[in-house]
Amino acid sequence: MIAIDNQTVGEMVVEDFARTTVFEKHQIDYCCNGRRTLQEVCEEKGLSLAELTAELEEVRPPPTQVTWATGARLRLRHWPSTSSTGTTVI
């Protein structure tokens, strides 16, 4: 269960980056306006707090999966890029 009392949407993303998919789906700014609580966001957007919380619970990966810190490193390490000669570098 997500602890939403006094936790901002920015803090929720830092805790679990997978939550960005839900926030982006509902056009919730978790970066520049990340200091708002989930309750405040729901009131502003006319969303159901219970439904949004349920959505956030569904996308939350198990604790054993990749975290924000390791996930960013893994994605960047395996991101293919193209060199100036047009060959793909992995």
Image (cartoon, rainbow, N blue to C red):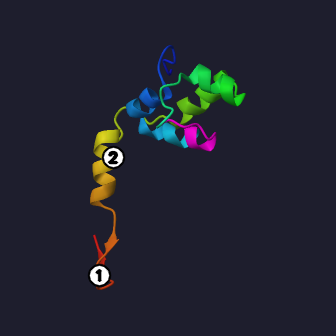
Mark 2 or 1, nearer chain start: 2
Residue 84 bears which disc, if any? Answer: 1
Kindly identify the amino acid type of the residue bearing the numbered disc 2. Gly
Q: Is residue 23 left or right of residue 66?
A: right
Question: CA gap, disc 2 to disc 1?
Answer: 27 Å
- Residue 75 found in image quarter: bottom left
Kindly identify the amino acid type of the residue bearing the numbered disc 1. Ser
Magenta-colored stretch includes residue 1: no
Q: Is residue 9 in sight in this rendering?
A: yes
Could you say whether the residue bearing mark 2 is in a helix, strand or loop?
A: helix
- Residue 78 found in image quarter: bottom left
Q: Which residue is mark 2?
A: 71
Q: Residue at x 29, y 78 (%)?
A: 83
Q: Residue at x 36, y 39 (%)?
A: 65
Name the residue nearer the viewer: 29 or 1: 29
Report the mark closest to the observer, 2 or 1.
1
Name the residue nearer the viewer: 90 or 82: 82
The image position of residue 28, as x and y in percent, is 58, 37
Which class describes the residues within 10 Å of circle 2: few (<14), some (14-19), or many (20+)?
few
The image position of residue 21, as x and y in percent, is 54, 43
The image position of residue 33, as x and y in percent, is 51, 32
Magenta: main secondary structure: loop
| Span shown in magenta | 23-30
Find the residue positioned furthest to the right.
46
The image position of residue 90, as x and y in percent, is 28, 70
